Image: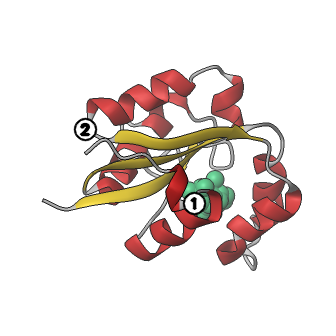
């Protein structure tokens, strides 16, 4: 059994639709636990820095503008194979390609307003968690 932590962000589109709770339930139903969380309005420089891996991509400016358009709900999820589990619960990045029953198929509008972000690897999960939370603010109940 591999217990992992991953970073999850509920994006401005989902926060403004008042579905934070519905999305968290999807994670909890699959055995993931919220071990740190806060609502935050990202600054432009925070969003640019968080998504710096995509800096050269054509969608970078639209992505940053969208991520600062309203508050986001940032959380650390913990559980068995949390990184892959979170990605399968979220579904494909593009909601048009996401399987029915995934968060993005059920709640996302398009590839930019796609409801949630989740770390894609162990290394990125560590980096992304450290970007927003110090270890002292993560509360595992295990
Ligand atoms: P996210 O998981 O937050 O990681 C980067 C984001 O860029 C992604 O979700 C999408 O919302 C956004 N994005 C926009 N266009 C693309 C694209 N062509 N490929 C990947 N991500 C994209």
Where residue 76 sits: x, y (%)?
48, 49
The structure residue drawn at horizontal position 79% and vertical position 66%, both measured from the top left corner, is 48
Q: Which residue carries the number 1 mark?
A: 134
Where residue 98 sits: x, y (%)?
43, 44
Residue 16, placed above or below residue 54:
above
Residue 85, placed above or below residue 41:
below
By what rule are the colours in the image chosen? secondary structure
The structure residue drawn at horizontal position 37% and vertical position 31%, both measured from the top left corner, is 26
Is residue 100 at least partly visible in the picture?
no
**Disc 1 secondary structure class:** loop
Residue 105, placed above or below residue 111:
above
Q: Residues within 10 Å of mark 1 (few under 14, many from 20)?
A: few
The residue carrying mark 1 has its beta carbon less than 8 Å from ligand 1: no
Quadrant into which the N terminus falls: bottom left
Mark nearer the N terminus (2 vs 1): 2
In front of the other: 11 or 94: 11
**Disc 2 secondary structure class:** loop
Q: Quadrant of ligand 1?
A: bottom right
Marks 2 & 1, CB-CB < 8 Å contact: no
The structure residue drawn at horizontal position 75% and vertical position 70%, both measured from the top left corner, is 49
Q: Which mark is residue 31?
A: 2
Where residue 21 sits: x, y (%)?
50, 22
Residue occupying the far bottom of the picture: 56
The residues bearing labels 2 and 1 have C-alpha atoms spaced at a distance of 23 Å
Where residue 14 sits: x, y (%)?
63, 31
Q: Residues within 10 Å of mark 2 (few under 14, many from 20)?
A: some
Residue 142 figure quarter: top left
The structure residue drawn at horizontal position 43% and vertical position 57%, both measured from the top left corner, is 6
């Amino acid at each position: 059994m591999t217990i992992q932590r991953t970073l999850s962000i509920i994006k401005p589109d989902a926060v403004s639709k008042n579905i934070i709770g519905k999305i968290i339930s999807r994670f909890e139903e699959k055995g993931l636990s919220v071990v740190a969380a806060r609502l935050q309005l990202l600054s432009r420089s925070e969003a640019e820095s968080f998504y710096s891996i995509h800096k050269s991509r054509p969608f970078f400016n639209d992505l940053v503008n969208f991520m600062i358009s309203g508050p986001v709900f940032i959380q650390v999820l913990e559980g068995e194979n949390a990184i892959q589990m979170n990605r399968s619960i979220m579904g494909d990045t593009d909601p048009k390609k996401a399987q029915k029953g995934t968060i993005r198929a059920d709640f996302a509008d398009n590839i930019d307003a796609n409801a949630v972000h989740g770390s894609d690897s162990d290394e990125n999960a560590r980096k992304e968690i450290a970007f927003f939370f110090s270890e002292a603010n993560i509360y595992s109940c295990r």
